[in-house]
Image (cartoon, rainbow, N blue to C red):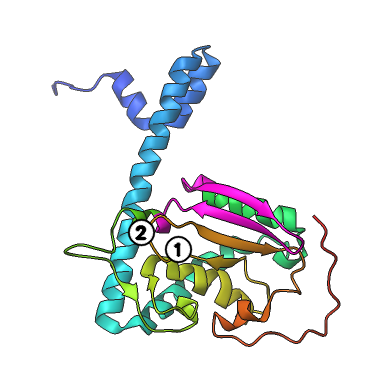
């Protein structure tokens, strides 16, 4: 007979996610225990996120160093076609959403990814300034420096926002969030300005009138501005 080292309670805890354990603690009237379990679940997710973003960036670095920067864009385009676009296919056209809804979606996603956000607004746009919890964190932690740094893209192109350099992880912002939507005849998710040095925020411009993006918003991703013949939409929120 096998001598068991795990009790039935051990097995049950191993099978039950921490957030489900937290729900059970709340139902049992143990809020302090529930809060502890939530904190543990967040720490677990943060560890997995750290592993994932470094895994992705390591792979993109390998692709760029072995096959060139254009291959990085091709890889990101494949990801956009196979993963990003299906996730965005909610049955609601992004361009049809009011600016408040578009800004909230972006902020919610970034904050849920361990980011922090400052919010401002002017007559034409909502400005979201993020301390990014993924790509920006890699920059701030010095992952593009040292003995085995991640790749910095150096070829001026749409994928680098026509900059002289762009952190390779951040290239999904240009390719998946701006270039591919524009190529499909839609508005970019937002007009993004990734940090150029550690400590800077990633700034997103969410325009109130999606037909009134400045020409530079298109030229910086290597595309010509669309004709301005469409009637401008009201700047409703």
Query: Is 34 in front, or is 193?
Result: 193
Label 1, on which residue? Answer: 195
N-term mark: 2 or 1: 2
- Which quarter of the figure has residue 96? bottom right
Q: Secondary structure at mark 2?
A: helix
Label for residue 139? Answer: 2
Percent x, y for residue 52?
35, 54
121 with respect to 178 (left or right): right
63 with respect to 125 (left or right): left
User: Is residue 135 located in the magenta-colored stretch of the structure?
Assistant: yes
- Distance between mark 2 and mark 1 Cα atoms: 8 Å
Residue shown at the point (53%, 11%) measured from the top left: 29
Percent x, y for residue 207?
71, 65
Badge 2 density bin: few <14, some 14–19, many ≥20, Cα 10 Å: many
Q: Specify the segment rendered in magenta.
A: 111-136
- Label pair 2/1, CB-CB below 8 angstroms: yes
Residue 122 in sight in this render? yes
Badge 1 density bin: few <14, some 14–19, many ≥20, Cα 10 Å: many
Percent x, y for residue 42?
42, 36
199 with respect to 141 (left or right): right
Residue shown at the point (63%, 63%) measured from the top left: 205
């Amino acid at each position: 007979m096998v001598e068991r080292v795990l009790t039935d309670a051990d097995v049950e805890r191993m099978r039950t996610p921490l957030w489900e354990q937290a729900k059970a603690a709340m139902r049992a009237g143990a809020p302090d225990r529930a809060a502890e379990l939530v904190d543990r679940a967040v720490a677990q997710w943060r560890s997995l996120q750290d592993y994932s973003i470094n895994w992705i960036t390591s792979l993109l670095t390998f692709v760029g160093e072995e096959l060139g920067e254009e291959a990085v864009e091709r890889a990101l385009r494949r990801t956009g076609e196979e993963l990003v676009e299906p996730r965005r296919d909610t049955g609601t056209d992004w361009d049809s959403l009011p600016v408040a809804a578009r800004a909230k979606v972006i902020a919610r996603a970034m904050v849920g990814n361990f980011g922090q956000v400052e919010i401002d607004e002017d007559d034409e746009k909502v400005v979201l300034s993020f301390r990014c919890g993924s790509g920006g964190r890699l920059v701030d932690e010095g992952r593009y420096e040292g003995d085995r740094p991640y790749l910095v893209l150096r070829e001026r192109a749409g994928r680098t926002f026509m900059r002289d350099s762009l952190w390779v992880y951040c290239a999904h912002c240009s390719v998946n969030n701006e270039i591919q939507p524009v190529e499909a005849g839609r508005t970019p998710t937002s007009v993004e300005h990734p940090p150029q040095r550690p400590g800077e925020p990633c700034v997103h411009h969410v325009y109130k009138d999606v037909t009134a993006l400045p020409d530079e918003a298109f030229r910086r991703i290597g595309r010509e501005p669309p004709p301005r013949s469409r009637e401008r939409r009201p700047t409703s929120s």
